């Protein structure tokens, strides 16, 4: 039997590169005894509902989907949340963060282009100027909340609005967006996110 290499996807190679980069970063921390995360002026909790307008995705069955180029964000944990590309018109703006409240709960992704989202996904529209780097920083922190939620305790829209995440703050106690931006820009492959 011969291995079929014709169906291999580029994502398989990207995953391998990411795994090696993650390993190398962890080795730096292990060898030097230093944390990879720099210090800020401090951290403070912020309610998601204060920072974002939260909207629920809209149900779209597979039977009603048409093939196309609009990303459809499902409650999955990979591929930036994109489960299909559909022919329907995008309902949500680019420059937002999607968070699963069902399925792979608390998976959060920055969305760089307009999209549709399943009703298992909440869409966070920032009330501040967001960049891809800042969105990735915040999405990473949102993912850390995963342990709080499960099938029996879903992270539905109302609960998400009231949820708090800790963010680095500046000297005035406001979210330190400059710190977030610079930190993400300091990481390998950060030139690929703009």
Image (cartoon, rainbow, N blue to C red):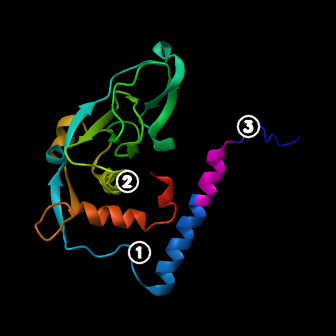
**Front-most of residues 60 and 97:** 97
Q: Which residues are magenta?
A: 9-17
Magenta residue check for 118: no
In contact (CB < 8 Å): disc 1 and disc 2:
no
> Which residue shows up at 37% across the image and 55% down it?
133
The span from disc 1 to disc 3 (Cα, nearest Å) is 37 Å
Disc 2: CA contacts within 10 A as few (<14), some (14-19) or many (>=20) = many
**Front-most of residues 151 and 110:** 110
Give the residue at mark 2. 136
Instruction: Determine which quarter of the picture holds residue 8.
Output: top right
Give the residue at mark 3. 7
Give the residue at mark 1. 36
The span from disc 3 to disc 2 (Cα, nearest Å) is 30 Å
> Which residue shows up at 12% across the image and 65% down it?
173
Determine the secondary structure under disc 2: helix
Residue 159 spot, x, y in % from top left? 18, 41
Residue 5 can be seen, yes or no: yes
Q: Is residue 191 above or below residue 2?
A: below
> Which residue shows up at 19% across the image and 47% down it?
48
Disc nearer the start of the sequence (1/3): 3
Q: Is residue 138 above or below residue 173?
A: above
Disc nearer the start of the sequence (1/2): 1
Disc nearer the start of the sequence (3/2): 3
């Amino acid at each position: 039997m011969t291995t079929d290499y014709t169906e291999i996807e580029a994502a398989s190679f990207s995953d391998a590169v990411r795994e090696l980069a993650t390993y190398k970063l962890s080795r730096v921390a292990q060898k030097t005894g230093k944390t990879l995360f720099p210090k800020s002026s401090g951290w403070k909790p912020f309610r998601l509902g204060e920072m974002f307008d939260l909207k629920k995705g809209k149900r779209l069955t597979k039977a009603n989907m048409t093939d196309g180029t609009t990303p459809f964000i499902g409650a999955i944990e990979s591929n930036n949340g994109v489960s299909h590309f559909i022919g329907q018109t995008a309902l949500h703006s680019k420059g937002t963060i999607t968070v699963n409240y069902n399925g792979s709960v608390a998976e959060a992704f920055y969305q760089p282009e307009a999209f549709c989202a399943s009703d298992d996904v909440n869409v966070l529209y920032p009330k501040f100027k967001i960049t891809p780097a800042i969105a990735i920083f915040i999405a990473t922190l949102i993912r850390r909340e995963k342990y709080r939620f499960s099938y029996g305790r879903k992270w539905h829209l109302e609960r998400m609005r009231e949820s708090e995440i800790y963010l680095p703050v500046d000297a005035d106690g406001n979210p330190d967006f400059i710190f977030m931006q610079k930190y993400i820009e300091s990481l390998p492959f950060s030139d690929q996110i703009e």
